[in-house]
Amino acid sequence: MQKILILDYGSQYTQLIARRIREQEVYAEIISYETTAEELKKLAPKGIILSGGPNSVFEKDAPSIDKGIFELGIPVLGICYGMQLMSQILGGRVVPGKEREYGKMPIETAKDNPLFKGIPSTITVWMSHGDRVEAIPSSFERGALSATCPFASMFDNKHKFYGLQFHPEVVHTQYGTEILKNFVFFICQCKNDWKLTNWVDATVKELKDRIGGEEVILGLSGGVDSSVAAVLLHKAIGKNLHCIFVDNGLLRYREAEQVEEMFKKNLGLDLTVARAAERFYEKLKGVDEPEAKRKIIGKEFIEVFTEEARKFKHCRYLAQGTIYPDVIESKSPKKGPSQTIKSHHNVGGLPPDLKFELIEPLKELFKDEVRAVGRVLKISDELLDRQPFPGPGLGVRILGEVTKEKVELLQQADRRVQEEIKKLPDYKTIWQTFAVLLPCRSVGVMGDQRTYEYTCAIRSVNSLDAMTADWTRLPYDTLATISNRIINEVRGINRVVYDISSKPPATIEWE
């Protein structure tokens, strides 16, 4: 199987580069920037991509590269920091930018640059950099420029080295996918031979071989990721899989009951439901800082899960539905020098006496790939089309202190959001729509009486994989209906607002 290897310099978009390439049915894998030229040669990639990153090439301990990589005869594409590093290593000059470019910028492309084959001469791209290339190496040519960046791209066709100062992998860049396709197919001459049906067969066999007759515990949330992981493992090992579902009291309306019915009754999985809502509410008393809430919820989840896991005395393995976005937004030193944006709580940090070996069958897949795997496994569309839900649940959709009363208030508001959104003909194309309870009250009038109640924000975004997202242009009539229903039917909320922020710079969740 042919592949493109991506050296990770810590960009929050690194996995997104891999995803864009996999969309073309070409396998892309992310490896450490410290990988040597000798190791890369053994891996025999058709092409190498140097990702962006948060560092400056001028920093004392800035991530670097084995210079021998440029002597392997393999095409190399540097993106943002990767382009600056390539330029510096090969004899160009990088300088701190006088003006930081961040956001959408128009560029003029050079017609001889193969990266822009079949692409208009003027396009809008997504910039995110401070330093810039002031002078390119002697063997290179200018590939594009912007008003403040003399070398928005550079290329050396003889050695097949290419650089982009912008991010082609994000949706904000026009023709970004076409640029990457030009590198993968036109320059690297790859074949599209990576299919998810083959991945499922290979993964089931791998799980069977690895697990054998041993038993596995899986923390089931009812979301797409853990559900697909559960069915995949059930296909591989059957009754030796034991699922644990923790009802933390921060779930969507009637979610615990729905999960129990779906997995225990309909799919026949061995499922234990731990009802622990009151424990979580008690731990969250008086806490309003977002990261503190995430850590408390994660810690309590581990404690509840541990209590249940101890009941399975013969289990050797612990399985998780970890996917790529979980990895990219949490610090991952084995992959690259990424910066932590926010914490995620998978089942980590278990007591040392619970010596489980970890199994994460989905950790290299993006959300839409996970859904595609689910369809190969013949999981129902009702389950696969569920919108993503954060691990900490409504705890990060209630700004400020979390209480049982606020959870119930938000559940009722969000229930009405879901009911109305599902009526839209394009519902399945919307990545995520949900309600957020704000920690502020405002004056209203209902039935000729003054009210002083909470504000609810509606968040709806379109995305492929949660790495970038744009706010959804919901119909005004739908927004009006949602607002009227929440204000009229949910006592405690008298104002509804709509969030029109994109990611970046905002995140999808409010906390």
Image (cartoon, rainbow, N blue to C red):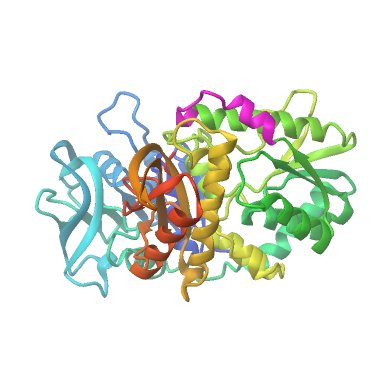
Reply above or below: 357 against 361: above
Which residue corresponds to the image point at 50% horizontal and 25% vertical from the top-left?
A: 287
Which residue corresponds to the image point at 71% horizontal and 28% vertical from the top-left?
A: 303
Q: Position of residue 331 (x, y in %)?
A: 49, 34
| Residue 322 is a magenta residue | no
Is residue 150 toward the left or the right of residue 476 in the image? Answer: left
Judging depth in this view, the residue of 21 and 142 nearest the camera is 21
* Residue 308 picture quarter: top right
Q: Quadrant of the C terminus?
A: top left
Asked whether the viewer can see residue 462, the reply is no
Is residue 394 toward the left or the right of residue 9 in the image? Answer: right
Magenta segment, which residues?
277-291
Reply above or below: 69 against 473: above
Judging depth in this view, the residue of 408 and 279 nearest the camera is 408
Q: Position of residue 370 (x, y in %)?
A: 60, 60
Q: Position of residue 81 (x, y in %)?
A: 30, 42
| Residue 289 is a magenta residue | yes
Which residue corresponds to the image point at 35% horizontal and 25% vertical from the top-left?
A: 61
Q: Position of residue 304 (x, y in %)?
A: 73, 32
Judging depth in this view, the residue of 442 and 53 nearest the camera is 442
Q: How many marks?
A: 0
Asked whether the viewer can see residue 212, the reply is yes
